[in-house]
Structures are given as C-alpha cells and as structure tokens.
Amino acid sequence: MEQTLPPLTGGKLILGSVAVALATFMNVLDSSIANVAIPTLSGNLGVSVDEGTWVITLFAAANAVSIPLTGWLTMRLGQVKLFVWAILLFTLSSWLCGVAPNLVFLLAARIMQGAVAGPLIPLSQALLLSSFPKDKGASALSLWAMTATVGPIVGPALGGWITDAYSWAWIFYINIPVGLFAAGVTWAIYRDRESPTRKIPVDKVGLGLLVVWVAALQIMLDKGKDLDWFSSPVIWALMLTAVIAFVCFVIWELTDAHPIIDLKLFAGRNFLAGTIAISVAYAVFFANLVLLPQWMQTYLGYRSVDAGMATAPLGIFAVVLAPVMGKLVPKSDARILATLAFLGFAGVFFMRSHYTTVVDTWALVMPTLLQGIPTALFFVPLTAIILSDLPPARIPAAAGLSNFTRVFCGAVGTSLAATAWSNRTILHHAQLTEAASTSSPIFADAMNMLEPVFGKSALAFYERQLNTQAAQLGINDIFWISGVIFIVIIPLIWFAHAARGSSGPAVGH
C-alpha cells in the first residue's frame, strides 16, 4: 500500500530522518564492525580465527532469512510498531553480545541480532520516503544509501579503535544509546503515522524450508574448509539438505496461495537482471571488506585500529557524492551509472592485485579512497533498475526479496572468498616450497644470508617469510578475480530495460 500521509516538515523532518538513518546505520555498521575485532575476540574467547568468523557469517545469514518476513510482519503489526520493536530487540541483543562469556553464547546473540535486524532496512526506506515530498524521493533514497553504504566502511575503523582502546565487547555496547535514542524519537514522531494492519496467513512451510536451506548452505560454506570439503560426509549431508530443501522451497513458493517470498518476481526482466547484478556485486564488495583488514592485521602487522583507519577513506567520496546522486539519478539512465560503478570497482581491485608484502600505507589507502566513487554510484541506480517495471502493489515484496538476495549473497561471498584465499595460499605455499630445496641456489643464498643473523632459527624465519609471501599471492588472486567478476557482470545491467531513477524505488508498505 502506498503512503498517503503528508510529508513531515521542519524540525520533525530533520529529527525523524536522523532517527531512522541512525537505526539503518546501526544495523549495517554491525555487519562489518566485528571484522577487525575477530582476531582479538577469538583470542579472548579461546577459539580459532576461523571459528571467530562465524560471528560475521551467522549474523548475515540470520539477517537474510528474516528480511522476507518484513512484509507479513508489517501487515500484522504496522510498520512503525515493527520498526520500533526491531530497534529495541536489536539493542537488547547487542547487550547480550557484549556480555557473552563464550563463543556459543555470542553466536546465539548474533543470530538473534541478525534476525531482528531484518525489517530495519526495508522499513527505514519506507519511513524515509514517507517523510519527504514525492518529488524529493530520490534525495530520501540517497540519504538511505549513504547511511547503508557508510556503515560497513566506518565499521572497521570504529571497531579497530574500540577494540584497541577498550575491549571487543564495546563494539556491541555502543548500539545501546543509539538504539534507545532512535527507538524513542521514531515512536514520538511516527506513531501517529502508523500503517493499516490486517491478519494474513503466514507461510509456515515456506519459512521452515527457507531456514533449512539457508542454514545448511551457510554451515557448509563455513565449515567446508575445516572439514576438507567433499571428503567429509558432514559436508555431503549439508549439501544434500540444502539442495533438497531449496528445490522443495522453490516448488512450494511458486504454488502456495500466500508465499512468504514471491518468486514470480524473477519473471520480470529488470528485477531478475538487477537483483543478480546487485547481489553478486555486493558479495564481492562485502567479502573484500572483510578480508582486507584481516590480511593487514595478520600479515602486515597492522593493529586493529590502523587496519580500520586504512579502510576508512572509502567513506569520503561515498558521503560527499550522496547528495549529488540524489539529483543525478532521476535524470540519468541507471544502467550507465551502474556500469561506471562496476568499472570503477574493477579498476580498484586490479590495482590491489599488485600488492607486495612491503606495500606502504599510501598504496593501501589510495585504492580505498578511489573505491568511494563507485560505492556512491552503486545502490541507488541498481535499486531503480530492480523496481522500475513493477506496479506499486508489488514493490514491498520486491524490495524484501532483492534485499534478502543481496544480504544472503554477502554472507555466502564472505565464506567463499575466505575459503578461496586459504586454498590459493596453500597452492602458492606448495609452489614456493618446491624452490626451498638444498639443491636450489636461491635457497642456499638465502640461508647463507640468514644463518649469520638468526643462527639455528634461520630456517624457521625463512618458513615464516614463505608463509607471508604465499598469503600475499593468495590475496592478490582474490583481488584480481574480484575485478574480473565486476567486468563479467556488466552485461547483466544491459539485459535490463532502460530505467531512469526516481522516487520509484519507494518501499512503501
């Protein structure tokens, strides 16, 4: 249902927009703030870094599962009540994350946090768009995109500083005052603008199948590396469970009278092309956002805060260009803007693919700074493409489904990229080790130089250097293939019909 209430004005418009934007920012910030804290967090809880990365992936997976429920929950509760309750439960789960005594408790709290965060993104769009006049819809969407984009960028820097200055628990505690403020202000301003409610049946079978195949696939991706993939019966069982549940899910959703996800939306050319493009692009974007600070900390010796600060410049152009996008998108072909964004991303990743183990801070910061430009061009044009051919009645379902696909692909992309980095590191280590034989003149020269300095530890030092070089070559491979992926998916954008951005991507409920 489209919003028919008059727009907000004056102080209410400013305060309401700030509160809604803060809730969005808090949500997306938590998708990345833990990235740089994983090594510290894992050490404090007595688990490996690989186990610690579940803090990221389970949040993303739970978030992906809950997003499609937004439409149904809105009909039952109303968008304002649902939004405020989601903020309050997110705040509670953030506190539980901070007080977690062990990894199991923390993961359970992160699952809860991701699940209750699901409605925040679609409803923040709806509330912002209802707050602005119709002719300012693109500006409202640009404000949303700025907060949604800057959150993952600021996350590593903020998370690194908090982890080093205080403790990892405070990366979750900071949500408490923000959440309480956002919930209080939102309720005060928007409670008289509640959407109509009605009782509609919930697709319990579809929801159950969705949880099963998403959970099975996510666990398979996360544990595959540790269990040596398909040499493990556990991985086979998870794969079969995911495939069977997914097939049953698709069949059920296409035939049920009240599907939890309207898969028939994929019959639309623009929705299909735009959703695949934004999901694959976000998977690559988010995976690199996770791996970059981990590589810097583990192999370059950066502290958490330094790794975060080196990635923070990504937000400069993303913020500066956000108001420009609000004016540019309604007048431009969204396919051209999205293409420029993908070319920009590809160029940045190709620049990074030439890194060495002695890369300086400026060489790390420059591509990150430049990446802010395609980041600013990323969300709004692709959202315009996704929703451009749809009638208003189908926009809420389309927004939920496209957000679900994007967020879930972000979780999958992180798991695949981490596994690929590990595999490429192992391959390069094996190739480098072949040269480390007594018959190799290069190895002999290296030992002759190292032994006077390190004595009996010369070989151990050589092995550490070899490990660092192998990891460097592995991460360079990930950067290079990331650039290739952005080039390859450009034709998807042009499979869609021409779509000019407007207030069309209004996600009214």
Image: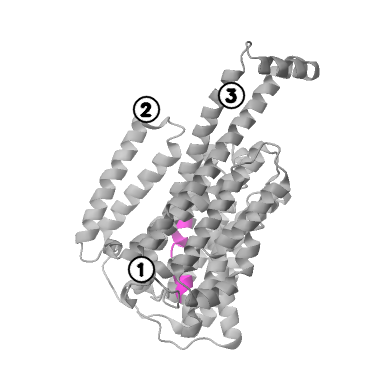
Q: Answer with the quarter of the image where residue 467 lies.
A: top right
Q: Please report the residue visible at 57 percent of the width from the left and 84 percent of the height from the top.
A: 12
Mark 1 vs mark 2: give the one in front: 1
Q: Amino acid at mark 1?
A: His
Residue 290: x, y in percent? 56, 48
Q: Which residue is mark 3?
A: 432
User: Separation of disc 2 and disc 3 at Cα?
Assistant: 26 Å
Relative to 118, residue 110 above or below: above
- From the viewer's side, name the closer residue of 372 and 461: 372
Q: Please report the residue visible at 70 percent of the width from the left and 39 percent of the height from the top.
A: 301
- From the viewer's side, name the closer residue of 128 and 340: 340
Q: Earlier in the sequence, mark 2 or mark 3?
A: 2
Secondary element at tag 3: helix
Q: Which mark is residue 113?
A: none
Quadrant of the rendering where the N terminus is positioned: bottom left
- Span of residues in magenta: 114-126
Mark 2 closeness class: few <14, some 14–19, many ≥20 residues within 10 Å: few
Q: Is residue 31 visible?
A: no
Residue 313: x, y in percent? 67, 58
Q: Which residue is mark 1?
A: 497
Mark 2 vs mark 3: give the one in front: 3
- From the viewer's side, name the closer residue of 453 and 115: 453
Q: Which residue is mark 2?
A: 231
Mark 3 closeness class: few <14, some 14–19, many ≥20 residues within 10 Å: some
Q: Is residue 433 magenta?
A: no
Q: Amino acid at mark 2?
A: Ser
Residue 406: x, y in percent? 43, 57
Relative to 190, residue 21 above or below: above
Q: Amino acid at mark 3?
A: Leu
